[in-house]
Amino acid sequence: MKRMKTLLMTAVMAFAVTGCVAPVPPEKGAATEPPLNEVSPHLKGVALQLTTANENSKTIFQYSYAEYLGDGRGINFGIVGFTTGTYDGNDLIKHYTELNPHNSLAKYIPHLDAVDRLPHTGNAGDSNDSTEGLEGFIEDVQSNTDPLFRQAQIDKMNSSYWIPSVRMFSVIGAQYPLTQAFLYDMIVNHGQTGAKTLIDLATSEMGGTPATGIDEGAFLIKLMDLRYSKLINTRNPGADRVNAYRRLWTEGNVDLVTPFSYTVYGDEFLIDGNVYE
């Protein structure tokens, strides 16, 4: 059961008359981001697996998961808990329809568009939490075995959650795979804006980031503390997932060396990095 919810930089190239390509220099004074510092594919699998355990109580992706939780986000579904009430569910279905125009979920797009035009409060029972017009949606997700539906979820997981977490990881100058995993889980749980707010607050309270000389362990603990306080103050049961990452820190597994035991919400999982079926 899902517990909670919630661009790679491209080099600009100019073609010369000869057909050769040459990089266009940045404008004078323009801000530039650091190169993306991405962990290995195996460690990415570990990070994804941890969040899958947090979200769905499974260690492999749950492509056909769908449930209405009454948490103010509409219907939660898919591998990261895309939701019908927070835009990303509609975005996913539209991408899936690009891959397979005749899929069983395309018929819900007009209803999802209607939800997306409403105020998004995040409160249970409010307009964006409505499932009106989505009767049958849960069953259609649960019965969907289309490989293109799985591919669409992987695509959107990467573009909306993983890559933004890699960018944050790179910008703050972090190195620990545990930090990368925690940032990814934050974005899945809080969205990009919510995660950035927590990072900005940690940066302010610590007087900088690892990129500016702050000890990464101290910065990560501060980030955990801030996130835990936010979840506790809103009586959010997701606070226990913060404790789960904190235990990995206490155990000294900042490199996420597999296999290892991971306990969250009272359930214990063996993490080996194999998140794909």
Image: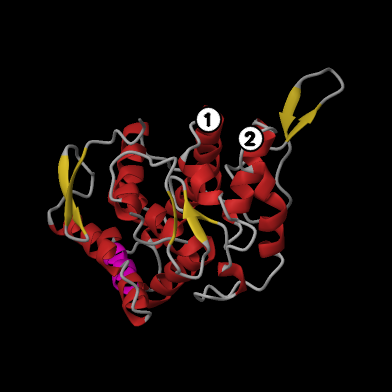
* Residue drawn at (17%, 37%) of the image: 259
Q: Earlier in the sequence, mark 1 or mark 2?
A: 2
Badges 1 and 2: C-beta atoms under 8 Å apart? yes
Residue 77 in picture, x, y percent from top left = 47, 51
- Relative to 207, is 150 on the left or the right? right
- For label 2, the crowd category at 10 Å Cα-Cα, with few meaning under 14, some 14 to 19 and many 20 or more, is some
| Three-letter amino acid code at the position of disc 2 | Asn
Of all residues shown, which one is farthest toward the left? 251
Which contiguous range is marked in magenta?
Answer: 218-226
Residue bearing mark 2: 103
Main secondary structure of the magenta stretch = helix
Q: Nearer the viewer, residue 235 or 66?
A: 66
Residue placed under numbered mark 1 in the picture: 146
Taking 141 as reference, is 83 above or below it? below
Residue 171 at what x, y percent from top left?
Answer: 48, 55
Give the tally of numbered discs: 2
Which amino acid does the dot numbered 1 rest on? Asp
Q: Secondary structure at mark 2?
A: loop
Q: Residue at x 51, y 58 (%)?
A: 75
Front in this rendered view, residue 33 or 10 = 10
Instruction: Please indicate whether residue 261 sits to the left or right of residue 185 in the image.
Output: left
Q: Residue at x 34, y 60 (%)?
A: 3
Taking the spot 81% from the left edge, 18% from the top edge, the residue there is 19
